[in-house]
Amino acid sequence: MNSSSTQRPRKVLILGALSGVAEATARAMARDGAELALVARNEEKLAAVAKDLELRGAGKVVTAVDDLASGEDVAVRMRGFSDLLGGIDTIFLFYGVLGDQDEADRDSTEVRRIIDINFTSAAEWMTAGVDHLENSAHEKPAIVVASSVAGDRGRRSNYAYGAAKGGLSVFAQGLAHRMAATGKTRVCVAKLGFVKTAMTAHLDRSGPLWAEPETVAEALVRALDKGGPIIYVPGFWRFIMLAVRATPAFVFNKVNL
Amino acid sequence: MTTGAIRRTTEWRSWGRVDRGEHFVATPGYRADVIDAFQSFADASQSTLAVGLGRSYGDSGLNVGNGLINMGGVDRLMAFDDERGVLRAEAGASVWDILEFAVPRGYFLPTTPGTRFVTLGGAIANDVHGKNHHSAGTIGCHIERICLLRSDRGVVEIAADKEPELFAATIAGLGLTGVILWADLKLTRIPSSVVAVETTPFENLNEFYERAKATGDKAEHTVAWVDCLASGDSLGRGLFTAADWDEKAATRKIARPGGLTAPFETPSFLLNRLTIAAFNEFYYRLGRMRAGRTTLAYDKFHYPLDGVREWNRLYGPRGFYQYQSVIPPKDAAEATREMLRAISKEGDGSFLAVLKTFGARRSPGLLSFPMEGTTLALDFPNRGEKTLQLFATLDKIVMDAGGRLYPAKDGRIPPGVFHASYPHAEKFAEHIDPQLSSTFWERVKRT
């Protein structure tokens, strides 16, 4: 259970609301009666998700069509999202692209695209977001950012994506450090392992490492109140990545990952 | 997040795990993505079948060598008409999704299958029934409108008064008349989320019929578990359960499915006459001891098997069959006795044999399975030829008594048996979408 039992339901901004994990998280928040502002690019899909969340118990759902990867006037747009709900006290940041590493190896514009979307724009939204959260009436405003275990060690199959997510994790960690000293906002970065969503539908998803979006969502909702600033979701990934990071390069180089 | 990804996989299996093969699987997240996936299968000249949570036991939920659209991610609730209690939901919404919405508001599904892990689309395609069939009929009796995606016509809405023939073909239509995108389901009011249950043991089949007759329509839900390995004077002994929603309880609590998962496949050598007979004996004695009145949360009554995820793995690596028949009232007692005798003689019975009386309420579905009479459902571990021979014996009893078998549970029904017992099959076939098919249909269709 989250703090909604002691406080009024949270007012939540979800940046990138159409992914499988984002929607599962929104449903978990809706069950507790949260008010939700959903941002994504596809209007029709946003409308379908919004109606569903209303029926599943959300106190209020509003939507905004926005290309979050574009870095123009971030502070102004953030205010616009916040005004839709009459203020926000919680932010989930979910959007991102996996990109195409083979393409990135050949063409540096793909490298830039992957890093701009996953790192640069996300870092801007977090910076603007924290300002809003500090002004909220909520005792414990929180921002939870979806990152990836891919950021813990570069590997040939997705190192541009990994670098962007690794950078994002460090950025969030630093922001959490700043807030611990000077603010009330909790900042938490969640390093996700393999999740069964549309983003990974083309992969073989058998085996115990694959998590359901609902399981991940529960962990992210818990992260609003405790844990962090860095969590692994599911938790066992902390130990897997510990081992991956500790593997000497001469061994790692022989593994096709 | 739209991806046009289609994955080639051998992971997709029937619930009984006997039937398997390679599929090309699309996993759309939204209705618009379903339309795209359907088109890309058409472009690749692959036939297509929309699937849900994979609870069909046999090959009706497979399309081996061809395309599947996994509708699990298309699971949104779309609208609720408060005055009439009608819920519109996307085809991938599960019974669980619907209950989570309905129960706290004092509603329930008009009838429910024995698991929450069934999608609305799957429930319609198989015209599922529940323990209240004698009062509520099948789910198809409560579907008011369906939105279909057809390869030849695009998106069409159908209802009992709008293209009634296509509507009747779609209910129990095995997903072949178009991809179901969403449907309107009329929910039913419940006084509480608790059921008052009365369990009575019966010593043999005659007593079952006496009990069923005595109970009649007085209880909304009735079902019996039967010890299919008992023989002689005890042939057909079991436990009769009658239940009603508890008017006195005030709770409207949603129950979450349990977290237990069957940890491994039971080795085949543990599934033999001795272990199964011992289980049945134990279950019967336990039931007799506990007989009487009690109250249960709705999930404990309706979805006992949901407590263990992937329980189908308990039947071992070779999988299992389910055999569900219905026999019209005239010969029901005699034919059921004959079937139980054959099963008990073979000694290859199941843990969960279920006996129930169906009522006279008819579904609009052309291929709907339930009809007035007695239904018997049993699991059988797959022992190859031996099991199939037993089924041939049972088929004959069912056919001679004018009964039929349930395609959702099947993986081997001979085409002749199917067509003889489903007289509307040819009329149904006229409504099949040329882009859709299933392994089941390829096996039984008349060309």
Image (cartoon, coloured by chain):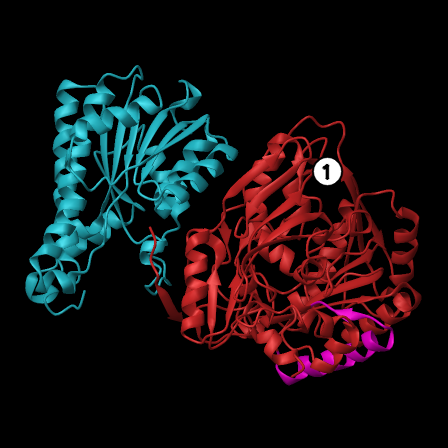
Residue A237: x and y, percent? 26, 50
Mark 1 packing: few (<14 Cα in 10 Å), some, or many (20+)? many
State the image quarter where residue A194 is shown.
bottom left
Q: Nearer the viewer, residue B233 or B307?
A: B307
Residue drawn where x is 81% and y is 47% of the image: B135
State the image quarter where residue A185 is shown.
top left
State the image quarter where residue B123 is shown.
bottom right
Residue drawn where x is 65% and y is 68% of the image: B431
- Horizontal side of residue B6 vs B374, given as left or right: left
Chain in red (letter):
B
- Horizontal side of residue B156 vs B106, given as left or right: left
Indicate the quadrant containing the C terminus of chain B: top left, top right, bottom left or bottom right.
bottom right
Residue B298 position (above or below residue B236)? above
Give the magenta range.
B383-406
Q: Helix, strand, or loop for circle 1?
A: strand
Residue bearing the label numbered 1: B195
Residue B3 position (above or below residue A170)? below
**Does the rendering let one see residue B255?**
no
Residue A186: x and y, percent? 24, 26
Residue B404: x and y, percent? 78, 70
Q: Amino acid at mark 1?
A: Val
- Horizontal side of residue B204 vs A237, given as left or right: right
Residue B191 position (above or below residue A24)? above
Residue B227: x and y, percent? 77, 63
Residue B420 position (above or below residue A251)? below
Residue drawn where x is 28% and y is 23% of the image: A141
Chain in cyan (letter):
A
